[in-house]
Image: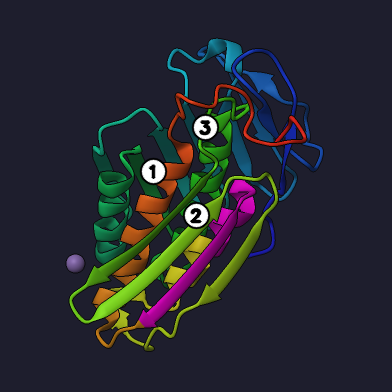
Amino acid sequence: MNDVSTAQAVPAASAGPVILPERKPNPPPVVLADGSLLFRFEDGVEESIVAPEKRILRRSARVVRKTRETEIELALDLNGAGQSTVATGVGFFDHMLTLLARHSLIDLTVEAKGDLHIDAHHTVEDIGICYGKALAQALGSKVGIRRYGSATLPMDETLATAAVDLCGRPFCVWKAEVPLETLGNFSSTLAEEFWRAVSSSGAFALHVVVHHGRNTHHIIEAIFKATARALREAVEMDPRSPGVPSTKGVL
Ligand SMILES: [Mn+2]
């Protein structure tokens, strides 16, 4: 789908940037009772984000996004314990999101109603957009984080590597041969769609390499688990390095 608003980081108060939509909402954003800003766009897309000064928990974020294709409410907490409540209507994807939370220790709540009568494409991609936005929002100014993370992870016959750099620039390199197969109502091609959407709206570099593997379920699961482990490392606070982890001073 093409109605994706590209996110832009705008420096703001202590809790870090609010990721504002790039295009102009119409009418102007409204402030909701809980302090969230609600943006409405002419094509029917609605997005709401929690203003930093209203955030109760640091390093957490909530994104609500409505289009004619999907309605998604997603919240995450970087200081989590790996807990999740996930209901997307796509069983295999629920399985992947649950283990993403578990192995990244990023708590995750997702409630999605998508146009599954067509297929799972819009639902999976739009959840990726929301996950990326929430990640960027929760990271804020990125002071004190490790920034880089990588993991090589075996799952039976499959070996996958994921590496991330939370650098503020979107880039996704996908070197994975995933057999064409539909797992429940999840097409195996959607794994790449999801991670491309996450890295793009989260503005970070993600490299995924599958060294070898045969079973489609194992290959996709190894990718999600490796990326979860890489993210866990990258978002973690580094006690030896208190500032922004960049020689530029800004990420
Ligand atoms: Mn499994």
Say which quarter of the image contains residue 106.
top left
Q: Is mark 2 within 8 Å of ligand 1?
A: no
CA separation in Å, label 3 and label 2:
22 Å
| Image quarter of the N terminus | bottom right
Element at badge 3?
loop
Q: Name the residue located 60 percent from the left edge and 65 percent from the top edge.
A: 172
Image-quadrant location for residue 243: top right
Q: Earlier in the sequence, mark 3 or mark 2?
A: 2
| Residues rendered magenta in the picture | 196-211
Q: Is residue 173 above or below residue 199?
A: below
Task: Name the quadrant of the C terminus.
Answer: top right
Could you classify mark 3 by the number of other residues whose Cα lies within 10 Å: few (under 14), some (14-19), or many (20 or more)? many
Q: How is the image coloured?
A: rainbow
Give the Cα distance between marks 2 and 1.
Answer: 17 Å
Residue at the disc numbered 2:
128
Report the disc number at residue 232. Answer: 1
Amino acid under disc 3: Ile
Q: Position of residue 231 (x, y in %)?
A: 43, 47
Tell me whether the residue at label 2 lies in contact with that at label 1, contact meaning CB atoms closer than 8 angstroms: no
At x 31%, y 30%, the residue is 80
Can you identify the residue that label 3 sits on? 145
